Amino acid sequence: CTGTGGAFPAGGTSLVDWLIKELYLCPNIRTEVSDVYVNAGPARPFRAPGHPQGAWALEQMLDALAEAIGMDPVELRLKNIPTFSQTRNGNPAYTTTGLRECLEEGAKAFGWDQARKEISRTPGNAKVRRGVGMAGSIWFVGGGGPPATVIVRLFSDGSVNLNMGASDIGTGTKTVMALVVAEELGIKPEAIQIEHADTGTTQYATASGGSKTVPTESPAVRAAAIDVKQQILKLAAEELKADPTTLTIIKGTVIHGKDPSKQIKITDIPGLKAQGVVVGIGRRGLNPRNKFVNPFCAQFCEVECNMRTGEIRIIRFLSANDSGRVMDRLTYDNQVVGGITMGVGLALTEMRVLDAEQTGKMVNRNWHDYKLPTALDVPGWIVSLPLDRPDNEANSTGSKGLGEPVTIPTAAAIANAVYHATGQRMTTSPINPVTLCEKLAKGRKEV
């Protein structure tokens, strides 16, 4: 593999082959990755640095192999799923490996077998042909880890302040953290005010990146909320004359588990009124020893290709993800749709055009000529299918990364679908009407 960052180091190039060596069982793999310097401006890696490009190559090669031996692409992958890391010293096990479930449940929900049967009955000379494709992925981080410290304050009026260092870069981090606190304290998320990402007033947190914000920060948030909860139950126990371990908090009220008649609202607890505030501190614990936390994904898509014009239309898309516990379904699905959209850009529309023979400058550096995918390019039928299986070995909230893993297999799945429809193996991206028509004109397969 060859990558370039222009006249600057190409960030992400070193990760291109990591997925190739890790995703499926194979004892004999050799890769070569080169970072080439050219007379051009800087280029930075796509979402999930290096991995979409690695998946583009690996997943198309696997489909070609499956065709050569007469095996269904999904079945080939199911026969080669690892439960341990192949690139790390000692081959440590994963805490959870959801790739098998992603493949099986994704194929079933998508209707993979039925779609392939229906497409096989399409006339070979049809002007518009359909094809289905799929691809899998693993993200090399996404388990998070220390350090991270959080402070939660519960005031006598029932309001809560969450003080954390993590940034919300549009991914819904604040929503998820508020839900973690609300779940532990038995209150509404609306009662929580959040201070975040202020080096002068908030606590330390690692950077919001690498699809590790939630698995890094949420365990610390939960620990701080548990600290507050234990203090509140102790104060309530004094008033109810009960053992704190028999009490729970439901909708802002402390209730005795065995005798529900014994209850008191948080705002009515005398001890809290006297103190004015209860403060809890939480810290992110260590990751499990000798095991690794990795998110997995499998995606399925159906495309429609015009054999005369080279136009490609994505009909439907499904993404099955193993990202641990689903902390909030709305923000989860938004991440999935956003990641797929970026993958569509890599597959069909986005490309840097350089004035290579003159200045090396990028000549399509505007919103009109750099073809970001629009609503017309993204299918209306997108299904997010989370396994929603908490990884309890990973951390105290059972969460794993999601943001980047979604984008990794998208372009490869689309390329495999285009091949299924047209019989033309597209080895370079983007696949647009010009490049597809050139391949169709040659009238031969290139694998």
Image (cartoon, grey):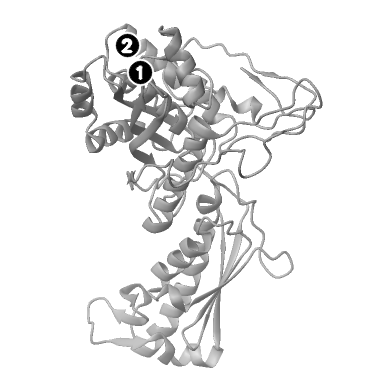
State the mark number for residue 67. 2
State the mark number for residue 422. 1
Residue mark closest to the camera, 2 vs 1: 1
Question: What amino acid type is highlighted by mark number 1?
Answer: Thr
Q: Quadrant of residue 202?
A: bottom right
Query: Earlier along the polypeptide chain: callout 2 or callout 1?
Result: 2
Residues 411 and 289: in front is: 411
Q: Position of residue 288 (x, y in %)?
A: 50, 42
| Label 2 Cα crowd, 10 Å radius (few <14 / some 14-19 / many 20+) | few
For residue 446, above or below residue 401: above
Secondary structure beneath dot 2 equals helix
Decide if residue 37 is on the left or right side of residue 376.
right
Q: For the point 41% across and 92% down, which residue is it?
A: 268
Residues 74 and 154: in front is: 74
Question: What amino acid type is highlighted by mark number 2?
Answer: Glu
Q: For the point 37% across and 76% down, which residue is it?
A: 244
Q: Position of residue 363 (x, y in %)?
A: 71, 34
For residue 319, above or below residue 242: above
Asked whether residue 93 is in view, the answer is no
